[in-house]
Amino acid sequence: MLKFPKAYYEHKQVTAAEVEVPPAELVNQIADEAVATDSPTADIDKPSEVAQRLDTSWLPFAAKTYKISADLNDYVIVNIPICPSDIPNRNGVGFPLAELIAYQPPPIARLTYKAWTGCPVHLEHDNEDHEKAIGVIFDTSLRVMKGYGKDKHYVVYGLIGIDKKKDPETAAKFASGAMNTGSMGALADYFTCSVCGHRATDNQFTNCAHIRSTKEVNWRIMDIDGRKVVAFLNAHVLSPIEYSCVADPAWATCLTEMVLAK
């Protein structure tokens, strides 16, 4: 079960009224501009390029907060998917592209998908205490999911580091390929039905006919006007909080063979 950091219990979460989601006609344009901007991170394929291309001057400060190493050489570094856009996971939740590229007001103050940068890396979503972190996300990048859905879907990738000194076992597993899957953590302000857009709640009696309750896994193949559609929950107003190394990811595609530093 996903736990939330204690800091989020007391923090006033951003509300829907404060987040401006891009209009539909501009979503793909903004996403493509983000893909181009992120290419220096997306193209990293050598450990030396992490320090050359990214600003990691904040690592010593993050190290004190998360109780991890301040030395970049102490990390197994991998490029791994955080989440795809518009495709539901096995929990029946999808993240619309428009939400991932929405610019968040303070305290996040950046594009939503970029807010995973600097977040802690945990093991199996044991994330209530940030000092239990086993690493950190050095940067994120947005990429087109080539050859799928007519190239209309995107994937958020994270350049994550696993501290070899704090958790040598997990670091060794990723370095050897024995473990290569992950799962992101984020808060959502509210959910809507992927079929009709109706706002979903935990009360199944007030929801539309496609969704049961937000407390349940909503994954239903339905016949709507003679065509097959998948009914699931779309998450809105996202607040990234962490990424976890897990054995059983919610998105089966969140795996990697891109180990940059062992």
Image (cartoon, grey):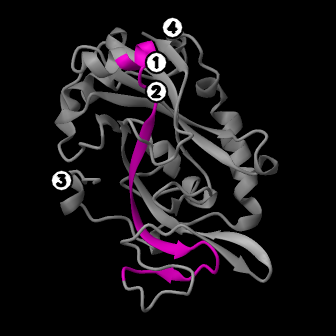
Q: Which residues are magenta?
A: 173-202
Disc 1 to disc 2: CB gap under 8 Å: yes
Residue 131 location, x and y as percent?
Answer: 17, 35
User: For mark 1, what is the residue?
Assistant: 177
Name the quadrant containing residue 213: bottom left
- Vertical side of 93 occupied by 164: above or below: above
Q: Earlier in the sequence, mark 4 or mark 1?
A: 4
Q: Earlier in the sequence, mark 2 or mark 3?
A: 3
Separation (CA) of disc 1 from disc 2: 6 Å
Q: Amino acid at mark 1?
A: Gly
Q: Residue at x 48, y 31 (%)?
A: 139
Left or right, 62 with reference to 250:
left
User: For mark 2, what is the residue?
Assistant: 180
Indicate which label's residue lies in the foreground, 4 or 1: 1
The secondary structure type at the circle numbered 2 is loop
Residue 32, magenta (yes or no) = no
Left or right, 155 with reference to 260:
right
Disc 4 to disc 2: CB gap under 8 Å: no
Disc 4 crowd rating (10 Å Cα; few below 14, some 14-19, many 20+) is few
- Vertical side of 56 occupied by 153: above or below: below
Separation (CA) of disc 3 from disc 1: 33 Å
